[in-house]
Image: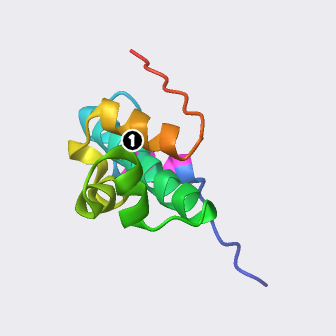
Amino acid sequence: MKKKIKTYSLEELKNKYIGKRGTKRRELYETELSLDLLGEAVRQTRIKKKLTQEQLGQLIGVQKSQISKIENNFRDTRINTLIRVFDALNTKIRISIES
């Protein structure tokens, strides 16, 4: 007789190990995940447009290191810099704020 393996949804695992939606720990996790995804979106779009970090930086007037920070550690990026990045990449961005 085969033993049945219990499966869990991603939401169940997040609830168990990170916390339920609305808890401080879960909200922090969701915010950090969103920022990481945004940085990755910048990287993927830049690569798709065949631009180096240095070239993108020149387009918006910042150093290559600033583009690297946006792509790898988004937390300290100003919104106007992000808007200039997406303008230079000729890409639309939608921002949703929920409370």
Q: Secondary structure at mark 1?
A: helix
Percent across and percent down for residue 56 are 42, 56
Residue 55 in view: yes
Q: Main secondary structure of the magenta part?
A: helix
Task: Determine the residue located farthest toward the right in the rendered image.
Answer: 1
x 45%, y 68%: residue: 52
Q: Is residue 55 above or below residue 74?
A: below
Query: In screen coordinates, is 65 left or right of 87?
Result: left
Write down the region rendered in magenta: 11-16
Give amino acid for label 1.
Answer: Glu
x 46%, y 51%: residue: 37
Q: Please identify the quadrant where the N terminus is shown.
A: bottom right
Residues 14 and 85: in front is: 85
Query: In which image quadrant can residue 49 be found?
Result: bottom right
Residue 20 in view: no
* Residue receiving disc 1: 30
Magenta run includes residue 13? yes
Percent across and percent down for residue 28 are 28, 40
Task: Determine the residue located farthest toward the left in the rendered image.
Answer: 76
Magenta run includes residue 97? no
Percent across and percent down for residue 16 are 40, 50
x 43%, y 20%: residue: 97
Q: Is residue 49 above or below residue 1?
A: above
x 52%, y 48%: residue: 12
Task: Determine the residue located farthest toward the top in the rendered image.
Answer: 99
Residues 79 and 62: in front is: 62
Percent across and percent down for residue 89 are 54, 47
Q: Please identify the quadrant where the C terminus is shown.
A: top left
Residues 87 and 70: in front is: 87
Query: In which image quadrant can residue 8 be found?
Result: bottom right
Query: In screen coordinates, is 71 left or right of 96?
Result: left
